[in-house]
């Protein structure tokens, strides 16, 4: 899994084992920090004395929604330090995926589609990537949008789902076929608390 967030700290992180999908930095001024990723700054005094933000509020842990947060170091506030890091890690997938990408779906009932040709009329965008989960669901990535297609519903209404998969796959820049679900399981083991993971694997 690619990195989806940063933790920047000035002293040891207590009760936290480093995770493979998070970048860790000990220096707030490290030039390698990817500031486009959701970031947790650990250490109030260090952060306040930095040039990151002059308007920090000790009562508000959110600096920029879905982008930057702060937490006390262990020496500053033991309970808040431990709980704050846990909260950031638990919410990180939401910050990263839902903060960067919108999600919608194409459905034969709600979109009032009668046949495959009407389905393709809705594909008015360039498909960058497709994630095919067990030939049951397709997730299309176009810019900052993810579009879900539940093939089982289309199949129930006698749509030619084989044609749908082929045409979409031929038009995409990248197709990720996860026909046994192994890729999903691999990522789920890392962030099992995030219920919407399947729809966002296409961005990883």
Image (cartoon, grey):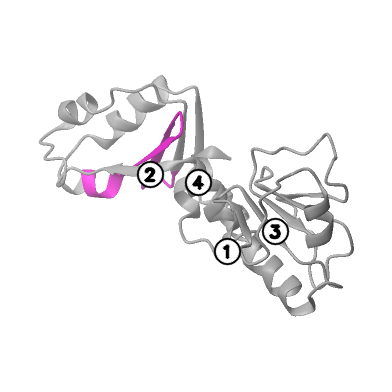
> Alpha-carbon neighbours of circle 2 within 10 Å: few (<14), some, or many (≥20)?
some
Residue 191 on image: x %, y %: 61, 60
> Alpha-carbon neighbours of circle 4 within 10 Å: few (<14), some, or many (≥20)?
some
- Foreground tag (4 vs 1): 4
Q: Are marks 1 and 2 in contact (CB under 8 Å)?
A: no
Of 28 and 182, which appears nearest the observer?
A: 28
Helix, strand or loop at mark 1? loop
Q: Which residue is mark 4?
A: 99
Q: Residue furthest front?
A: 54
Q: CA distance from mark 1 to mark 3?
A: 24 Å
Residue 112, compared with residue 183, is above or below; it is above
Sequence-wise, the earlier of marks 3 and 4 is 3
Residue 85 on image: x %, y %: 71, 66
- Foreground tag (3 vs 4): 3
Helix, strand or loop at mark 4? helix
Residue 75 on image: x %, y %: 87, 73
Q: Which residue is mark 3?
A: 70
Q: Residue shown at 50%/54% (left/top)?
A: 197
Q: Is residue 85 left or right of residue 111?
A: right
Q: Residue shown at 63%/61% (left/top)?
A: 189
Q: Which residue is mark 1?
A: 192
Residue 159 on image: x %, y %: 19, 37
Q: Which residue is mark 2?
A: 103
- Foreground tag (1 vs 2): 2
Residue range corresponding to the magenta coloring = 133-154
Q: Is residue 17 left or right of residue 140?
A: right
Q: Are marks 2 and 3 in contact (CB under 8 Å)?
A: no
Q: Is residue 151 left or right of residue 28?
A: left
């Amino acid at each position: 899994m690619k990195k989806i967030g940063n933790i920047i700290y000035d002293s040891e992180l207590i009760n936290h084992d480093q995770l493979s999908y998070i970048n860790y930095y000990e220096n707030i001024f490290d030039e390698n920090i990817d500031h486009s990723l959701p970031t947790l700054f650990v250490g109030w005094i260090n952060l306040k004395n930095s040039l990151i933000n002059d308007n920090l509020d000790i009562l508000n842990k959110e600096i920029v929604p879905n982008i930057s947060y702060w937490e006390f170091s262990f020496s500053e506030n033991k309970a808040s330090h431990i709980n704050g890091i846990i909260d950031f890690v638990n919410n990180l997938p939401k910050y990263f995926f839902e903060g960067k990408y919108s999600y919608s779906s194409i459905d034969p009932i709600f979109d009032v589609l009668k046949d495959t040709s009407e389905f393709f009329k809705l594909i008015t965008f360039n498909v960058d990537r497709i994630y095919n989960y067990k030939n049951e669901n397709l997730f299309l990535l176009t810019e900052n949008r993810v579009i879900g297609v539940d093939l089982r519903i289309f199949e129930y209404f006698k749509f030619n789902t084989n044609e749908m998969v082929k045409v979409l796959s031929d038009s995409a820049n990248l197709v990720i076929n996860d026909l046994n679900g192994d890729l999903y399981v691999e990522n789920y083991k890392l962030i099992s608390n995030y219920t919407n993971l399947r729809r966002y694997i296409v961005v990883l």
